[in-house]
Image (cartoon, grey):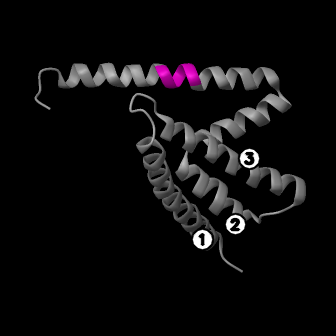
């Protein structure tokens, strides 16, 4: 039996392997889809977010309903691959489960992510403008 540290290292390697593969798959799929879409529509991102959410929902649903996928397989496929493919899948799954179990918390989670994410992008954009104003680039 593996020690606690060995088990953590194995789990970390499963997540890293899945995450690396998911990131490469995201880059490939997004590029293929975006190459066929109008440049002003980020359809590559939409495709990745929807497909990643489908994958995570399937893995977690099959695990819960049918007992499929071991803990290690979930680490590789859900946490690793789907997480590396798109964190939007995690956001979607967490909202879905919260909305089923505690609808008010689900709505608060949705608002916090969307409003917080947009505010953070704006703040980062403004900060970059302030820090790097007038620099060539």
Q: How many other residues sit within 10 Å of disc 2, few (<14), some (14-19) or many (≥20)?
A: some
Q: Which residue is mark 2?
A: 72
Residue 40 against residue 73 in the figure, above or below: above
Mark 2–mark 1 CB contact (< 8 Å): yes
Main secondary structure of the magenta stretch: helix
Residue 108 at x, y percent in the picture: 69, 20
Towards the viewer: 28 or 96: 28
Residue 136 against residue 72 in the figure, above or below: above
Magenta stretch: give its range: 114-118
Mark 1–mark 3 CB contact (< 8 Å): no
Residue 124 against residue 91 in the figure, above or below: above
Residue 52 is a magenta residue: no
Q: Which residue is mark 3?
A: 57
Q: In screen coordinates, is 26 left or right of 99?
A: left
Residue plotted at (10% across, 29% down): 136
Residue 123 lies in what quarter of the image?
Answer: top left
């Amino acid at each position: 039996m593996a020690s606690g540290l060995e088990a953590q290292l194995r789990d970390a390697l499963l997540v890293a392997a899945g995450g690396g593969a998911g990131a490469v798959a995201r880059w490939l799929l997004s590029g293929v889809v975006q190459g066929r879409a109008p440049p002003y529509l980020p359809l590559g991102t939409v495709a990745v977010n929807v497909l990643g959410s489908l994958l995570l929902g399937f893995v977690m649903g099959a695990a819960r309903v049918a007992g499929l996928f071991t803990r290690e397989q979930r680490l590789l496929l859900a946490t690793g691959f789907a997480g590396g493919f798109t964190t939007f899948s995690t956001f979607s799954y967490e909202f879905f489960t919260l909305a089923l179990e505690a609808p008010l918390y689900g709505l608060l989670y949705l608002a916090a992510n969307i409003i917080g994410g947009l505010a953070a992008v704006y703040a980062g954009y403004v900060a970059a403008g302030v820090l790097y104003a007038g620099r060539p680039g």
